[in-house]
Image (cartoon, rainbow, N blue to C red):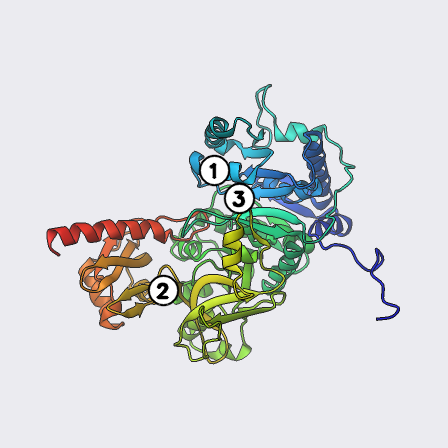
Amino acid sequence: MEGSVLCSANYVPLSPLSFLLRAAAVYGDHASVIYGETRFTWRETRDRSLRLASVLSVLEVSRGDVVAVLAPNIPAMYELHFGVPMAGAILCTLNTRHNSSMLSILLRHSGAKVIFVDHEFLELAQGALQLLSKKQGRVPHLIVIREPGESASLEENHYENLLSSANPQFDIKWPLNECDPICINYTSGTTSRPKGVIFSHRGAYLNSIAVVLLNDIHSMSVYLWVVPMFHCNGWCLTWGIAAQGGTNVCIRNVSSWIIFHSISLHKVTHMSAAPTVLSMITHAPASLRKPLPGRVNVLTGGAPPPPEVLSLMERLGFHVIHSYGLTETYGPATVCTWHPEWDSLPLEDRARLKSRQGLQHHLLEEVDVKDPVTMKSVPADGKTMGEVMLRGNTVMCGYYRDVEETKKAFAGGWFRSGDLAVRQPDGYIKLKDRAKDIVISGGENVSTIEVESVLFDHPAVLEAAVVGRPDEHWGETPCAFVKLKEGSCASSEELIKFCRAKLPHYMAPKTVIFEDLPKTSTGKVQKFVLREKAKTLGSLLQEGGE
């Protein structure tokens, strides 16, 4: 249009780094990070992040270089989310549950130039670097993060020592283009070898605002770090809390005691957690629970939370907000937005409604459930399954160094999640399964999520996961892996009978195995591990004559 111009006066590339600068200006003396006895203000967090960027510059980290970190939810991990991109570099947060072999693979794939390692994982990282050295010779520069006041050896590159002598006036290297990468996040590996998901400054900025809105995070909220910051950058709340000048309460390890203690001590207003953590909270011994100082909003996602767990959380005084997303969508992508008229429903009905995945959040363009072949939307009948597909500005840029997988993911102009769902009459989506997890028994589709939901209703069941077990006659049958509540008893026959009373016969588990469930660090059950166990079990049973 005549007279319209694009210039520095009306256009600046979006970047979540601006949140920190504003927080330091507006909330400079307000607490930014609390970790045990350690406290920082927003002004100090800004200065420490600038010093960190200066350190990287001295180490000859250039624009576009990758900087890795292996650490739990500690202040340094939070600062790295700002300091690394301030240096123009790309942050790569690594899963602390990986072994040295997998870490070496990811370090090699990412091409990391520097790696920051918390002292707790130093041996693990050193093992990875030794393997990497054998493969390619060159290894990332190692910087060790130690606890506040903890001494380091003279030959060690110590995080705090490096920061203390660095320049707090570092000139930030802002992105040249808002679509420049800000980080690489490797997927959790629940289905296959992790892939490197590329986040942009623009996408991180927008999704940070989205999670602040959907979680109702207000000015100077107090946020408890339960979700690992290495997972989707803490669902983008590493940057989102800075946008509101809130306080980050960091904890190294997660337990029901530390959660209740931290909420009480710091008057926590918000937290995020996977459904398995919610289950841990609801089943905490009464002696560990402390009355909540006020309403605590809990953003959950990663797997459909059982309605029973949602009911128990509400009884304890937590307000659960259910979201859904993937690493490829910067974490949360949808939200089960609550309607006031649902407040009058019985608790069980409210929990059932809240267990749905809902619709796209404010800054995602669209979510749909489509036939993956025809790309047509499935009817909103609550029965017809299709694949969850998303599109918008908070979808990844692609998979790092994997053009073919990127093409597959974006085929048809939508991001294909691999998750199966139905659309209900009110438009809200409800997950049924991962495409790889659906059990096909005698030609019938069995939603493992539905079977798990019934198992959770049994008073003795703490955790449950269902996978397909090979069967010569039916093709496969549902196999349940179950962990019982402490002090509870239940036999496999009892649980099978319980399921058959509530489900069609073909959907009920034919096999029940009692054991701890293998999980990723974010609480997702590693079903590919269970499938292998079920496959081995199936072979043994068939050889022995089931």
Q: Mark 1 or 3 closer to N-term?
A: 1
| Mark 2 Cα-neighbour bin, 10 Å: few <14, some 14–19, many ≥20 | many
The foreground one among 112 and 165 is 112
- The residue labelled by disc 2 is 449
- What type is the residue that disc 1 sits on? Ile
Task: Return the x and y of residue 449 as percentages of the image width and height.
Answer: 36, 64
CA separation, marks 1 and 2?
32 Å
Describe residue 474's horizontal placement relative to residue 79 as left or right: left
Describe residue 478's horizontal placement relative to residue 246 as left or right: left
- The residue labelled by disc 3 is 251
Q: In front: mark 1 or mark 3?
A: 1
Q: Is residue 15 above or below residue 109?
A: below
Could you tell me which secondary element the residue under label 2 belongs to? helix
Q: Is residue 194 above or below residue 446?
A: above
| Mark 3 Cα-neighbour bin, 10 Å: few <14, some 14–19, many ≥20 | many
Q: Going by the picture, which residue comes out furthest to the top? A: 154
- The residue labelled by disc 1 is 105
Q: Is residue 102 above or below residue 200?
A: above
In which quadrant of the rendered image does the N terminus lie?
bottom right
- What type is the residue that disc 2 sits on? Ile
Q: Is residue 371 above or below residue 437?
A: below
| Mark 1 Cα-neighbour bin, 10 Å: few <14, some 14–19, many ≥20 | some
Q: Disc 1, disc 2: CB below 8 Å?
A: no
Residue 238 seen anywhere in this rendered image of the structure:
yes
